[in-house]
Image (cartoon, helix red, strand yellow):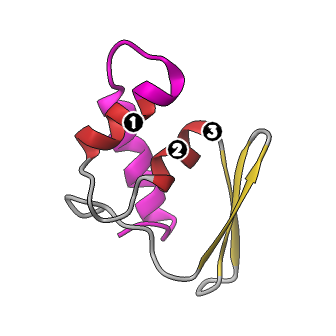
Amino acid sequence: MFSVQPKMVEGLDLNELDDGMVVFSESTDTVHHLNHSAAVVLQFCDGTHDADAIAGFVAAAFGLTDPPLEATMGCLEALSRQGLVS
């Protein structure tokens, strides 16, 4: 489970692509391929934003009228399971 204000773990190498982002985790020697939505969520996991705020950033990034809180929470849980945020 991620914290109230999720934060990217140390040792990630982020590389933006046309269709999302590739993340290399030095600690696990693992490569992760993120879509655009997950990439936006990850970029705001700096330990200062909660899920509500991150959902607001996602809404702004994609021109949505309502923040996708449920989808953002699911994404944060997936990023946590993959060891990318804590």
Residue at 44 percent across and 33 percent down: it is 58
Q: Position of residue 10 (x, y in %)?
A: 49, 81
Q: Which mark is residue 36?
A: 3
| Circles 2, 3 touching at the beta carbon (< 8 Å) | yes
- The amino acid type found where label 2 is placed reads Val
* Figure check: 52 above or below 43: above
Mark 3: which amino acid?
His
SS for tag 1?
helix
Element class at badge 2: helix
- Residue 37 in magenta? no
State the quadrant of the N terminus: bottom left
**Number of other residues with Cα within 10 Å of mark 1, as a class: few under 14, some 14 to 19, many 20 or more:** some
Residue 75 point in image, percent of width and height: 44, 45
Residue denoted by label 2: 40
- Calculate the distance from the C-alpha at mark 2 to the C-alpha at mark 3: 6 Å
Residue depicted at 35% across the width and 70% down the height: 86
